[in-house]
């Protein structure tokens, strides 16, 4: 059985002591709560010893632990009655022995608020176990909602730590000890609960390194009487000298705690006998601010005249304070009996800053935290130290909103991450890893499926769902709130754009090759500039975004490569229309009426950039050689020609047929199925008024991209042929080239 000093009291005994020691706190409500507590806890645990290690091994509140915690709360802090009620009622609520409605009706909303805070923290702790990160501590503080909940948690942890001295579950004991050291001891210090903080640290060391704890404790116990006398003998002469010097001061002497001694042993790599400042003396001067430094150095002179100092151990934070604002003068002197003693010299103002201000003692000793928590906790500690009236009365309206701008979210494995308030599933995905973010399609939040736009809340457990074919989109930038996610999305979008640009370059190059054109770089730059693009990247991105067609680019290139576009501008009168001697350049019978029709046998050519056929709306363009180029009205070069050379444009229309076939090219896209090319060529040869001139097929990764050159009598024949080809199995798209 456990040592009686460390055992949790049984319910009746603890309640009897509570009434005996604090009768003013026990009214009708408390008596009702305790009566229910004893009756229902006894019924639920009739076959169990409330002192057993089985109950102590649970990390939750137990029935026995509840009243014991209430008793310790009353002994160590002057609580309000609602805090006592909350401790006593919590086990009943947690185990379903009473309901919320009953408690709210009987005890009011303030008790309900405390119980809700305890339930939130208890649920979080049950789900995620030991606090191992700064974020976990911040999350607990956020979910507690009321500072009084934090105080109850700290007292309860002290009660638990006292009770588990001989618990057989070593893993549980170690977890509880680590929590006490990392989570509850720093909180107790911030609240000014120094006695609780010191006991939690010592007990934590006891359960994590019992051999070291026993060795240090034994050494201190052996020398306690002599040590107390030594401190008294050291302080006495110093006090007389300071009084003789006319100084106003307070002087304190103490022996460091077991945990503090162990911490110094670790840092200094020495044994307990090698700790210089095992004894510590603090001299606090009541002096005006402008005289602080001079008076501190005056005390330094008095002390070092009496005791030999160790120059290597002098720490002057008067001349140059620490970055956190800490000011003090530390010296280590060799006292009588050949013992080293640390003496700290500071003013009252410096001591208040070190203890309750920016450089609070927990930070001075190296415990990590955040500035907003520092300020808030120091404010709370000021309230606790107010002796005018009950400090806990001031705290009823003090909400735990120190992290109102942040949320703390778990992964399924229990890792905890901090994100800004309003963060979404997509923010969390990118916070984990950029690859996870880029592939995110949603998440399961607390087991429920959610979209990437879902906003997260503190305590959520989030499992990101990804897909291999998912890619970031531009509208994601309006979903995320963190700069990290926004930067990763922009980076991914740029990478996707760059890959697409490379594909656009390859596509354009392949099209030029299919046309048997070797593009010149200088001429391509002219094309890009002529089409209104300032940069090459912008040009290729427009191809990717399908703002311009590849065939339009090739047509522009062909237009610029024709010498007729490079001649100087001249008047229309200087052009002479030539009759054609080449039957391939003009129709054998006047199929086209050019101008007013008065001139017959005009020399013309069908423009290669758009290959007009009978039935297209067309216009003529007079070249420098006097040859008229016939363009379609929707030719990609039409707008440019009409805008730049309006005086060289001549009206043109079809007049009739003479059995002529016009050449045009079709682009066909589809699946690379067996026989698809045969089916296409068969349709063309069977189509009346059409003939196959040439075919070029490029197959890649199961897809084909083909160019089919055909001769047709007119546009109606071409439209009918396009419609038939589009019905061939495997054909995805068929269109006429410009």
Image: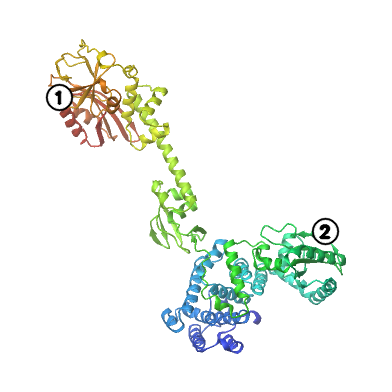
Does the image show residue 141? Answer: yes
For discs 2 and 1, the disc positioned in front in the rendered view? 2
- To which quarter of the image does residue 627 belong? top left
Q: Residue at x 45, y 45 (%)?
A: 490
Q: Residue at x 21, y 31 (%)?
A: 679
Q: Is residue 517 above or below residue 443?
A: above
Tags 2 and 1 touching, CB below 8 Å? no
Q: Which image quarter is the C terminus in?
A: top left
Q: Which percent across, then down, holds residue 453?
A: 39, 55
Query: Which of 303/16 is in front?
Result: 303
Q: Residue at x 54, y 67 (%)?
A: 141
Circle 2 sits in a helix, a strand or a loop, which is it?
Answer: helix
Query: Which of 324/297 is in front?
Result: 297
Label 2 packing within 10 angstroms: few (<14), some (14-19), many (20+):
few
Q: Which percent across, then down, holds residue 314?
A: 79, 59
CA–CA distance in space, label 2 to label 1:
110 Å
Tell whether 212 sits left or right of 396: right
Query: Which of 170/531 is in front?
Result: 531
Q: Residue at x 57, y 84 (%)?
A: 10
Circle 1 sits in a helix, a strand or a loop, which is it?
Answer: loop
Say which mark, if any, is on residue 311: 2
Q: Is residue 671 above or below residue 484?
A: above
Q: Which image quarter is the N terminus in?
A: bottom right
Label 1 packing within 10 angstroms: few (<14), some (14-19), many (20+):
some
Say which mark, if any, is on residue 689: 1
């Amino acid at each position: 059985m456990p040592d009686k000093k460390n055992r949790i009291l049984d319910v009746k005994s603890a309640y009897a002591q509570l009434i005996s020691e604090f009768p003013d706190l026990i009214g009708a409500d408390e008596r009702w709560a305790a009566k229910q507590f004893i009756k229902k806890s006894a019924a639920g645990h009739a076959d169990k010893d409330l002192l057993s290690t089985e109950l102590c091994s649970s990390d939750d509140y137990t029935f026995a632990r509840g009243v014991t915690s209430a008793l310790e709360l009353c002994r160590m802090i002057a609580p309000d009655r609602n805090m006592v009620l909350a401790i006593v009622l919590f086990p009943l609520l947690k185990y379903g022995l009473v309901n919320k409605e009953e408690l709210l009706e009987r005890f009011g909303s303030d008790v309900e608020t405390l119980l809700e805070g305890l339930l939130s923290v208890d649920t979080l702790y049950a789900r995620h176990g030991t606090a191992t990160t700064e974020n976990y501590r911040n999350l607990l503080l956020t979910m507690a909602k009321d500072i009084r909940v934090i105080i109850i948690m700290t007292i309860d942890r002290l009660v638990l730590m006292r009770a588990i001295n001989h618990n057989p579950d070593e893993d549980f004991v170690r977890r509880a000890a680590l929590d006490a050291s990392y989570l509850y001891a720093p909180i107790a210090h911030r609240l000014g609960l120094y006695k609780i903080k010191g006991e939690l640290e010592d007990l934590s060391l006891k359960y994590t390194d019992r051999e070291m704890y026993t060795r240090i404790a034994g050494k201190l116990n052996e020398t306690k009487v002599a040590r107390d006398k030594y401190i008294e003998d050291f302080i006495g002469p110093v006090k007389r000298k300071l009084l003789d010097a006319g100084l106003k001061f307070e002087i304190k002497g103490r022996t460091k705690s077991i945990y503090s001694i162990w911490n110094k042993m670790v840092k200094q790599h020495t044994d307990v006998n090698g700790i210089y400042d095992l004894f510590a003396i603090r001299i606090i001067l009541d002096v005006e601010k402008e005289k602080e430094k001079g008076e501190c150095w005056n005390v330094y002179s008095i002390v070092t005249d009496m005791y030999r100092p160790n120059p290597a151990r002098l720490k002057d934070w008067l001349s140059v304070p620490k970055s956190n604002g800490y000011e003090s003068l530390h010296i280590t002197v060799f006292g009588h009996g050949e013992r080293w003693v640390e003496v700290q010299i500071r003013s009252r103002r410096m001591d208040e800053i070190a203890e309750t201000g920016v450089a609070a003692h927990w930070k001075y000793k190296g415990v990590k935290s955040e500035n907003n928590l520092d300020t808030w906790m120091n404010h709370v500690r000021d309230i606790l130290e107010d002796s005018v009236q009950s400090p806990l009365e001031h705290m009823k309206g003090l909400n735990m909103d120190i992290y109102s701008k942040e949320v703390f979210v778990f992964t399924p494995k229990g890792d905890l991450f901090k994100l800004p308030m309003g963060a979404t599933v997509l923010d969390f995905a990118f916070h984990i890893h950029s690859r996870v973010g880029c592939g995110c399609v949603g998440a399961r939040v607390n087991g429920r499926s959610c979209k990437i736009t879902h906003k997260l809340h503190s305590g959520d457990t989030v499992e990101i769902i990804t897909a291999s074919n998912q890619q970031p989109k531009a509208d994601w930038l309006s979903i995320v709130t963190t700069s990290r996610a926004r930067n990763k999305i922009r980076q991914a979008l740029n990478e996707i754009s760059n890959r697409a640009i490379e594909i656009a370059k390859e596509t354009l190059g392949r099209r030029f090759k299919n046309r048997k054109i070797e593009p010149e770089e200088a001429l391509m730059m002219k094309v890009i500039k002529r089409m209104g693009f300032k940069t090459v990247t912008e040009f290729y991105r427009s191809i990717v975004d399908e703002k311009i067609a590849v065939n339009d680019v090739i047509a522009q290139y062909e237009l610029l490569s024709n010498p007729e576009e490079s001649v100087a501008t001249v008047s229309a009168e200087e052009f002479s229309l030539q009759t054609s001697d080449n039957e391939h350049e003009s129709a054998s019978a006047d199929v086209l009426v050019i101008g007013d029709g008065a001139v017959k046998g005009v020399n013309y050519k069908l423009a290669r950039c758009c290959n007009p056929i009978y039935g297209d709306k067309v216009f003529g363009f007079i070249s420098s050689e006097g040859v008229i180029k016939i363009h379609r009205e929707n030719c990609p070069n039409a707008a440019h020609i009409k805008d730049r050379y309006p005086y060289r444009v001549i009206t043109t229309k079809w007049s009739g047929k003479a059995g002529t076939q016009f050449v045009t090219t079709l682009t066909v896209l589809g699946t690379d199925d067996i026989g698809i090319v045969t089916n296409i060529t068969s349709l063309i040869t069977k189509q009346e008024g059409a003939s196959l001139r040439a075919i070029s097929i490029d197959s890649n990764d199961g897809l084909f991209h083909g160019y089919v050159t055909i001769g047709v009598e007119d546009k109606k024949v071409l439209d009918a042929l396009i419609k038939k080809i589009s019905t061939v199995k495997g054909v995805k798209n068929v269109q006429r080239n410009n």
